Image (tube, rainbow, N blue to C red):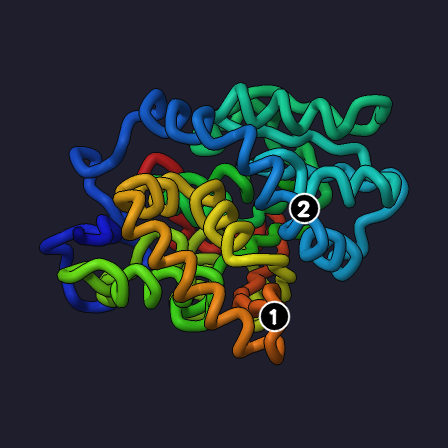
């Protein structure tokens, strides 16, 4: 069994921020992306969103989101950023390419007049320029086939002086729920491949804080800062850990569903032992995931850099 992450044959040097990560021929179609996330929506909402929403609450607080803030959440999933922002009094637009994910978000937001959740492709936002005070994405834009297009769109719809916030995973080895699962799969499945390192899988493409900052500056942001944070996640059992990995991303789903019943049982047993070792014998434990949180301010038209990339790049 191989772990199908990353792009075989991709260039080995650090990419120039002005060059798209993936050629147009290498990018999945919007329809393919939509179908994959639609298939995951129910379990993503059940297993992943409760964990990431705790982190989302921290992010919107630190972004000073409050009453009357015009807040955009792109690739919103089922509301890990959008709902905490609405609870703080923001007027929220939360978009996702997946209709099934938007349905889950709308169900969570039921009764709130502060959340509007249309289905929308984040690389082609059907939103007016300069519409939001804060535009944000948590493990969303970082997964886009055309990352730079997604960043350019966030900048476009944010008012001059407004904030763009992107949160994404740090290095793979620091995301324990993924690293432990890969370790268990490699122990249980002869020939299972490690995570590719260069280039890394899409969820980790912003793991290098210097490259992350360069991308934000190239998108036209000023005052760019990338800070390291930690997302702590309590897993009650190895089963919950595997359910979260399977539901969190189409790649994780392929890992878990690709196991035979015997392999899955062995992976679960290995993870159970790892969790018990962490927790002193109990079946569950808290795992840590390093996150990079990048922020920047949208410059006024007069101050915008002439090097700001063409959004269609």
Q: Earlier in the sequence, mark 1 or mark 2?
A: 2
Give the side of residue 313 with respect to residue 189, left or right: right
Q: CA distance from mark 1 to mark 2?
A: 18 Å
Disc 2: which residue: 50
Name the mark nearer the viewer: 1 or 2: 2
Residue 82 visible (yes or no)? yes
67 above or below 30? below
Q: Residue at x 38, y 23 (%)?
A: 35
Give the side of residue 62 with respect to residue 16, left or right: right
Q: Position of residue 46 (x, y in %)?
A: 62, 37
Determine which of the numbered discs, if any, sits on residue 229 in the image.
1
Q: Residue at x 64, y 61 (%)?
A: 234
Q: Position of residue 107 (x, y in %)?
A: 72, 23
242 above or below 295? above
**Secondary structure found at label 2:** helix
Classify residue 95 by image quadrant. top right
Give the side of residue 124 with respect to residue 82, left or right: left
Nearest the eye: 61 or 158: 61
Q: Position of residue 111 (x, y in %)?
A: 86, 22
């Amino acid at each position: 069994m191989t772990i199908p992450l990353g792009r075989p044959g991709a260039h080995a040097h650090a990419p120039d921020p002005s060059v798209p990560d993936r050629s147009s021929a290498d990018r999945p179609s919007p329809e393919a992306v939509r179908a994959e996330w639609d298939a995951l929506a129910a379990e993503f909402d059940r297993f992943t969103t409760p964990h990431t929403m705790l982190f989302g609450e921290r992010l919107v607080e630190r972004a000073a989101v409050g009453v009357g803030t015009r807040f955009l959440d792109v690739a919103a999933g089922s509301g890990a950023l959008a709902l905490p922002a609405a609870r703080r009094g923001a007027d929220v637009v939360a978009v996702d390419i997946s209709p099934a994910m938007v349905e889950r978000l709308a169900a969570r937001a039921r009764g709130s007049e502060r959340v509007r959740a249309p289905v929308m492709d984040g690389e082609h936002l059907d939103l007016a320029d300069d519409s939001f005070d804060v535009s944000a994405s948590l493990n969303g834009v970082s997964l886009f086939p055309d990352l730079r297009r997604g960043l350019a769109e966030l900048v476009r719809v944010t008012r001059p002086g407004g904030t763009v916030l992107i949160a994404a995973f740090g290095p793979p080895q620091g995301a324990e729920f993924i690293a432990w699962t890969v370790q268990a799969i490699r122990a249980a499945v002869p020939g299972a491949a490690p995570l590719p390192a260069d280039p890394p899988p899409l969820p980790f493409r912003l793991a290098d804080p210097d490259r992350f900052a360069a991308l934000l500056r190239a998108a036209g942001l000023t005052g760019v800062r990338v800070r390291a944070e930690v997302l702590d996640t309590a897993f009650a059992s190895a089963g919950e850990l595997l359910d979260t990995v399977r539901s969190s991303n189409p790649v994780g789903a392929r890992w878990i569903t690709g196991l035979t019943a015997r392999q899955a049982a062995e992976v679960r047993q290995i993870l159970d032992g790892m969790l018990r070792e962490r927790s002193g014998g109990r079946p569950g434990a808290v795992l840590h995931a390093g996150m990079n949180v990048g922020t920047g301010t949208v410059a006024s038209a007069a101050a915008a850099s002439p090097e700001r990339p063409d959004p269609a790049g």
